[in-house]
Amino acid sequence: MEPMVLEPFAATRDVHVIPTLFPVPNVGVIPMNAFVLRAAEPVLVDTGAGVLSEQFLDALSSIMRIEDLAWIWLTHEDADHTGSLERLLELAPRARVATDFFAVGRMLPARPFPLDRLRLVTPGERLPAGDRELVALRPPLFDSPATLGLLDDSSGVLFSSDAFGAPLPTAQEAAATSIADLDPGVVAAAQAAWANVDSPWVGSVDPAVFARSLDAVRRLEPTAILSSHLPPAHGQTETMLANLAAAVTTTPPPATTQAQLDVLLAGMAPAAV
Ligand SMILES: [Fe+2]
Ligand SMILES: [Fe+2]
């Protein structure tokens, strides 16, 4: 399959998901979600993958007038989260970018960024968005030191960035609109594997120390956990936390080798004439 942006769907009363499916050879299909939070000051959480920018912008404009965006919250600077950023700065001239200072610093060498459009946030800070506040937080797992998730204090929805993500075996599973539609054992194994690939330091963390990070999520009492790389999880916080706790002692999956790449490329070679 080719990477593709799917039809947006409502995950909660005021959050729409813009899902992208991204196949990963020998692994499965990874969901790549961006989110529209229908606050009085509308918020886009992350901006999709650059190679699918046209599809992404079409999907976004099917939900709202892009020019009405007030905030673009970048959870971190990775390419799967910042793909349409420059286009959106043009299309939404009043939007400001809420993110961590280091995220901008890590983007700047390749992607000059208008600093007057920036609204820096730090962990624990509350960003007013009209009818609610967005609480910036560091998720328990991350692959960039700049990562900032957020809690919508009105709905209790937690946007966790890469944390809680999982590549799923099939496109159908990756396209689910709720993890309630998936086999819990499949989700648990995939989350533990992803945790070890995306945050490889998790295997060297003292489980008791990591448990404190998970407790911080528990205390938020999120009504839903919206990961950038998993279908929405409603009311399943304890399951999600248990799956991450297990990641500390899970053997990391082996890295993809050149031999596997050779096999993959041989399968993609055009037929000889
Ligand atoms: Fe990332
Ligand atoms: Fe990501």
Image (cartoon, rainbow, N blue to C red):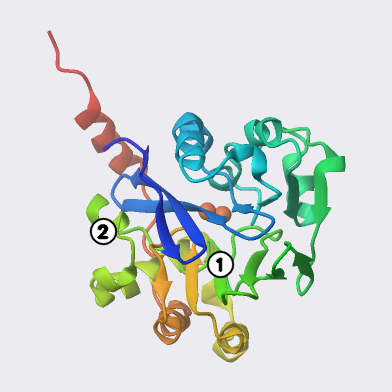
CA neighbours of label 1 inside 10 A, class few (<14), some (14 to 19), many (20+): many
CA neighbours of label 2 inside 10 A, class few (<14), some (14 to 19), many (20+): many
Q: Report the residue at 66% width, 52% height from top.
A: 74
Q: CA distance from mark 1 to mark 2?
A: 20 Å
Image quadrant occupied by the C terminus: top left
Q: Is mark 2 within 8 Å of ligand 2?
A: no
Judged from the image, the secondary structure of the residue bearing numbered disc 2 is helix
Image quadrant occupied by the N terminus: top left
Q: Report the residue at 72% width, 41% height from top.
A: 107
240 lies above or below 73: below
Residue type at mark 2?
Answer: Glu
Judged from the image, the secondary structure of the residue bearing numbered disc 1 is strand
Q: Image check: 116 left or right of 86?
A: right
In the rendering, at what x and y percent does residue 229 appear? 44, 58
| Residue position marked by numbered label 2 in the rendering | 173
| Residue position marked by numbered label 1 in the rendering | 160
Q: Image check: 183 left or right of 68?
A: left
Q: Earlier in the sequence, mark 1 or mark 2?
A: 1
Q: Nearer the viewer, residue 114 or 195?
A: 114
Residue type at mark 1?
Answer: Ser
In the rendering, at what x and y percent does residue 129 appear? 72, 62
Q: Is mark 1 within 8 Å of ligand 2?
A: no
Q: Nearer the viewer, residue 185 or 265?
A: 185
Spot the residue most to the bottom: 208
Q: Nearer the viewer, residue 52 or 248?
A: 52
| Residue 272 can be seen, yes or no | yes
